Amino acid sequence: DWAIDIKSYAKDISQQIQTTELRANLGLPVFLYDNKGYARARGLEFELIKRYANFVSGKLNYTVQWANGYSSSAFDDYVRSLNDFPNPIRERPLDWDVRHQIIFQMSLASPENIAPELFGLRLPDNWNISILSRFASGQPYTPFTLDPAVAQKTENSGIAPFTNTTDLKILKTLKLWGTNLGLFADIFNLFDQKNVQ
């Protein structure tokens, strides 16, 4: 009923969209999209899986990753050109670099005509309760400054606080007049966690 899945991944991402400045007639700047960006992502993923048995199934996933590159957006080169900054010569964390992430998923399900018992009390059948929880380290950000040169040097040098959210879904299926009717409730951010975006 149990399984462990371990994955390793590494990807070089070449020819990402960036902005190139050209000079038209009369020396006017023209900005065009160009395939010249580069980034790379690598990491490890560990997953513990419990197959459905005794009304319970679930997964626990942990990922550690590194996502580095020269630009997080197609507009980064454009912004640099406005300030007359050169393109970066070394990689830095990308906007979507989330170093650690844990995802927990669990389902309690009772099939039709098979009702579980809790403390000797027989519960209804034909229902499903699912919980999905995600805990992750914060994303990189550039500390605030009014100096564009300092912003260029410290791009994505800060790490935002961790984020955490839990969603809950409850489903009950009924048979009415020969028709299956499903009643469900979706509760997003169950614990009203305030996450910095």
Image (cartoon, helix red, strand yellow):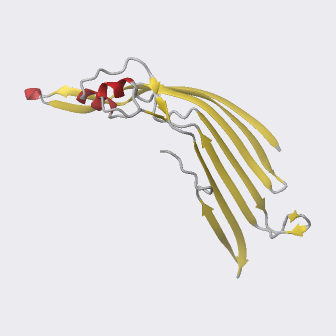
193 lies left or right of 128: left
Give the quadrant of residue 122.
bottom right
Identify the residue at the far top of this view. Answer: 89
Q: Is residue 13 visible?
A: no
Looking at the picture, how far across and down is residue 9, in whole percent? 60, 28
Q: Is residue 88 visible?
A: yes
Identify the residue at the far right of this view. Answer: 120
Foreground: 141 or 173? Answer: 141
190 lies left or right of 125: left
Foreground: 95 or 22? Answer: 95
Foreground: 23 or 64? Answer: 64
**Residue found 49% across the figure and 36% down from its top:** 96
Looking at the picture, how far across and down is residue 141, in whole percent? 44, 34
**Residue found 37% across the figure and 23% down from its top:** 153
**Residue found 79% across the figure and 63% down from its top:** 110
Looking at the picture, how far across and down is residue 132, in whole percent? 65, 51
Give the quadrant of residue 150.
top left
Number of disc labels: 0
Q: Is residue 193 above or below residue 47?
A: below
195 lies left or right of 118: left
